[in-house]
Image (cartoon, helix red, strand yellow):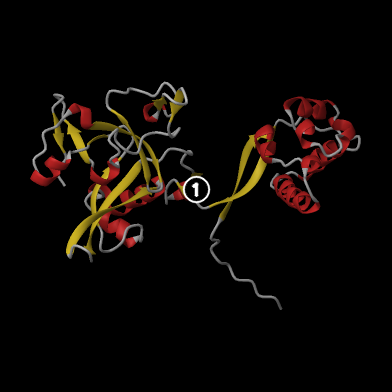
Amino acid sequence: IDIYYFTKEKNRCFATRKDLITVLSDFKNIVKAKNEEEKKKFEKKNRAIIESITDESIQKILMAHLAANNNDSQVAFSAEGIDEMNRNIVCLNNGKFHKPIKRVRVYEQSEIKFSVGQNGSKAYKFVEADKGTNLFFVVCQKEVYDKESGVEKKVREFTTIPLRMVINCQKNYGKNWQWQFETFLKKEKIIKQDSHLLFVLSPNDLVYVPTEKQIQNGIFTIDREHIYIVNDFNDSTIYFRPVNFEKAIAEGEVDLRFDKDKMRNIGSYSHKTATFDGVLIKTICVPLVIDRLGNVSLKKF
């Protein structure tokens, strides 16, 4: 007798409705495969995309439409190709009526979805933070022994915290979650036990970059030219822009410079991670606090 045991799945399965063009956008064109090995890879990926659609009749219609276009997915699954498929959908479905296909239900596994709540039906309602919406960038500090100088140096560590982790912390600690945030991060092994939480940055926060003299003296007189705004961040990388830039007109505009020899703008086409002097902002920056009257001061930590 076969005995089955219920186990909690690591990756829960979800079904979402998506536009057909969006689902088929990653479809590989087998016609353009360079060799037999690449063709097999394309076929495997295409099969996974088709099988992710929960309706088997739609799967058959899509495969029949692809075969009618000589397996050229670029033609078959373009906007015009899908319109043609919907016009001939009865023929593709072996003479059976089928409504035009515009949106499909897709099966997927996800670790980043989390439940809205714990009581009643909320435990079965799942949400997912939108891509590119990282809100919490953690800056930690620990002491490391330098063998050359024989002195312990303070080194910063950086990481991005997912929204669901912050919500879990709020659920566990309630109103006092900010005071217990470091304990929570160490418990979840997001930061190391020997690290100390300095501060947390969010998009549009202001930071001040002190000079070497100010760091040595420990006395900071705020200079507007040394103030930067947090743009966004991912993993351990964070991007800034000078406070006098409201928004970049062109992508990476802040980080470009004009090369006289090449007679064009050069530089990394991304947001700034360093000052104009080449100092890495995240390694020495200090967060700023603005009160209701507009007074700017350094955040104590």
> In the image, is 94 to the left or to the right of 113?
right
Q: Position of residue 76 (x, y in %)?
A: 79, 33
**Image position, residue 30 (x, y; %):** 79, 43
101 w.r.t. 250: above or below:
below
Q: Is residue 251 visible?
A: no
- Provide the residue designation for mark 1: 113
Viewer-closest of 215 and 92:
215
Residue found at the far front of this picture = 261
Specify the quadrant of the image occupied by residue 209: top left
Q: What SS does tag 1 mark? A: loop
In the displayed image of the protein, which residue is found farthest to the bottom? 1
Classify residue 241 as left or right of residue 175: right
Residue at left offset 20%, top offset 58%: 153
> Residue at the location (30% across, 38% down)?
278
Q: Is residue 227 above or below residue 145?
A: above
Circle 1: is it few (<14), some (14-19), or many (20+) Cα within 10 Å?
Answer: some
The residue positioned 65% from the left and 34% from the top of the image is 22
Front position in the image: 93 or 112: 112
55 to the left or right of 246: right
The answer to which of 47 and 7 lies nearer the viewer is 47
- Quadrant assignment for the N terminus: bottom right
Q: Amino acid at mark 1?
A: Lys
Q: How many marks?
A: 1
Q: Residue at x 34, y 43 (%)?
A: 136
- 154 relative to 223, above or below: below
Q: Quadrant of residue 78?
A: top right
Front-most of 136 and 174? 136
Where residue 275 appears, x then y in whole percent? 29, 35
Is residue 246 visible to the viewer in this orientation of the structure?
Answer: yes
Q: Where residue 55 sits in the image (x, y, percent)?
A: 74, 43
